[in-house]
Image: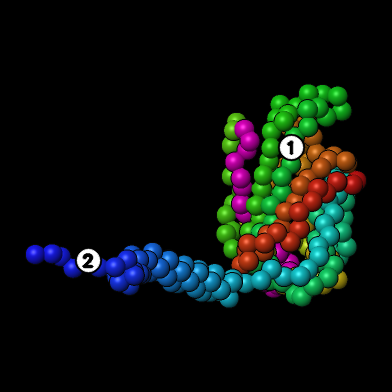
Amino acid sequence: MCRERISPEAERPFLFFIERESAVSPVIGVMLMLVVTIIVAALVSSFSGGLSDSAEPAPTTAFDISIRAGDAVGNGAKTNAPGPAPECVVLTMVSGDTLNSADLKIITTYTVPETYNGVPLANAGKVIKHTLDGAIGQTDKWDENSDPFIPQVNGYNLESAGLSCLTPGYGMVGKGKPYFGTCLFKAGEPYWFKDRNPFLGFDVTDRTAYGFQEGSVVHVTIVHTPSGQTVYDRDVVATW
C-alpha cells in the first residue's frame, strides 16, 4: 500500500497558517503594553493636574527690607511716633497685590562674628536662625549652648492701644500676641519693626555677646506659606 505524497506546494498553506498563529502572541503583548502605558500616563496627568489646580500660586510681589544697627534714641520700640528710628527694621512691599501677613513667614539668619572692636566673642561663629510667623505666636526660646542656636519662633504685637493690626505710621512693637498675623501688607507702604530683638531673635544691644553693628549681615527669607514659594531671599547689610 503506497502513501499519497503531498506536494510542497500543497503544504505551504498549512505552514503559512502555523506562522500566523505563532505571531499572534507577540502582537497581543505589544498591544497590552501600549494600553497599560496609556492608562498610566492618563492617571499621572490627571493626578498632577489636580495638584496644580489645588495649589495656590505664588504672589507676584517685591519686597525691600532695611535693618538699622543704631542705638535707641527714644523714637523707637517704646513709642508709636511715626517714622523709622535707628533701632528699626523697615519692611516695604514695593509692588504687588495686598498680602495677608498670616500667609507669610519671615526667616532671619545671623552668624555671630569672631570679634567686636577687636575683642573675641564667646558666641563667635554661632548661627542664630529666627522665624517670625504670626500664625504661631510662640515666645522666643533658645539654648545659647547649642551650635547653631535652635530656631526660634515668635509673634509680634502692636503696643498702640485699640489697634489690632499693623498700619503704616505705627511700628511692630514688642513680643506678645501674634498681631503680625493679622496685618495686611500693601504696596508702597513701609512697616516698621521698632523692636529688632523679636524680629532677629537676639539682643542686638548686647554687642559683646553678638557683635551686631553697622555692616553686620543678616540673611532674610520671606516664604509665602500657602504656595510654599520664596518671595524674598537675600542678604541685608545693617546700616547705622
- Badges 1 and 2: C-beta atoms under 8 Å apart? no
Alpha-carbon neighbours of circle 2 within 10 Å: few (<14), some, or many (≥20)?
few
Residue placed most toward the observer, 10 or 99: 10
Task: Tell me the mark number nearer the camera, choosing from 1 and 2.
Answer: 2
Which amino acid, by three-letter code, is at mark 1? Thr
Looking at the image, which is closer to me, 113 or 75?
113
Q: What secondary structure predominates along the stretch shown in magenta?
A: loop
Q: Is residue 157 magenta?
A: yes
Magenta residues? Answer: 147-167
Residue 111: mark: 1
**Residue assigned mark 2:** 5
Q: CA distance from mark 1 to mark 2?
A: 99 Å
Give coordinates of residue 106: x percent, y percent.
Answer: 69, 56
Q: Would you say residue 151 sits in the magenta stretch?
A: yes
Tell me what residue is drawn at x 83 percent, y 49 percent: 236
Q: Is residue 115 above or below residue 108?
A: above
Q: Quadrant of residue 163?
A: bottom right
Q: Is residue 34 visible?
A: yes
Residue at screen point 71% across, 49% down: 108
* Residue 230 in the image, given as x and y percentages of width and height: 70, 59
Above or below for 173 versus 123? below
In the structure shown, which secondary structural element does the residue marked by tag 1 occupy? strand
Residue shown at 25%/68% (left/top)? 6
Mark 2 lies on a secondary structure that is loop
User: Picture coordinates of residue 17 (x, y %)?
Assistant: 32, 71
Name the N-terminal-most of marks 1 and 2. Answer: 2
Q: Can residue 36 be seen here? A: no
Q: Quadrant of residue 210?
A: top right
Which residue does the image show at 76% across and 58% down from the upper left?
232
